[in-house]
Amino acid sequence: MVLLDTHALVWWTLDPEKLSRKASAACAKIVRTGSVISSISIWEIGIKIRNGRIDIGMTIEEYTRKILKMNCVEIVPVDEKIWMDSLRLNWENRDPADRVIVATARSRSVPIISKDEKIAAFVKNTIW
């Protein structure tokens, strides 16, 4: 079981060539072992679509349905425990999405697939 950072989710589902060799190998196991994403990743993708920063060829609603139909990705809601943990992180990163993604991985005790060096520097079990 792994947690996919937002970019890793998009690349795994829509453009897998962008994944590193290690990330690709970890993603190949998701169908058998499952994965989680933070619900904030859906929000983050939706914001990027709305602002014209990415085009995924579908609406965020269609993309979310596609993810759920895969039956191997659990979308974890951001609850008060995750919010509180994200606030307790001794980390200079002010991006709420990054903080929530890290807190979600911590709450599930799973590694994160991410190329983000800020996350990799903070989370020991980052795959890229």
Image (spheres, rainbow, N blue to C red):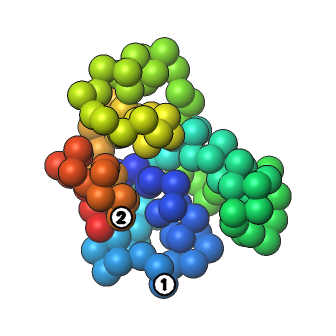
Dots 2 and 1: beta carbons under 8 Å?
A: no
Q: Label 1 is placed on what type of residue?
A: Glu
Rendered image: mark on residue 62: none
64, above or below 27, in the image: above
Q: Label 2 is placed on what type of residue?
A: Lys
CA neighbours of label 1 inside 10 A, class few (<14), some (14 to 19), many (20+): few
Q: Residue 122: where, in percent of width, then height? A: 23, 44
Residue 73 in view of the camera: yes
Residue at the image position 47 percent from the left and 39 percent from the top = 95
Quarter of the image with the C terminus in it: bottom left
The residue labelled by disc 2 is: 115
74, above or below 65, in the image: above
Q: Residue 78: where, in percent of width, then height? A: 53, 27
Q: Nearer the viewer, mark 2 or mark 1?
A: 2
CA neighbours of label 2 inside 10 A, class few (<14), some (14 to 19), many (20+): some
Q: Residue 72: where, in percent of width, then height? A: 52, 55
Q: Secondary structure at mark 1?
A: helix
Q: Residue furthest bottom?
A: 17
Q: Is residue 93 left or right of residue 60?
A: left
The residue labelled by disc 1 is: 17
Q: Is residue 93 left or right of residue 61?
A: left
Of residue 71 and residue 36, the one placed in the foreground of this image is 36
Displayed quadrant of residue 85: top left
Q: Is residue 31 left or right of residue 119?
A: right
The residues bearing labels 2 and 1 have C-alpha atoms spaced at a distance of: 14 Å
Q: Residue 87: where, in percent of width, then height? A: 37, 21
Of residue 73 and residue 63, the one placed in the foreground of this image is 63
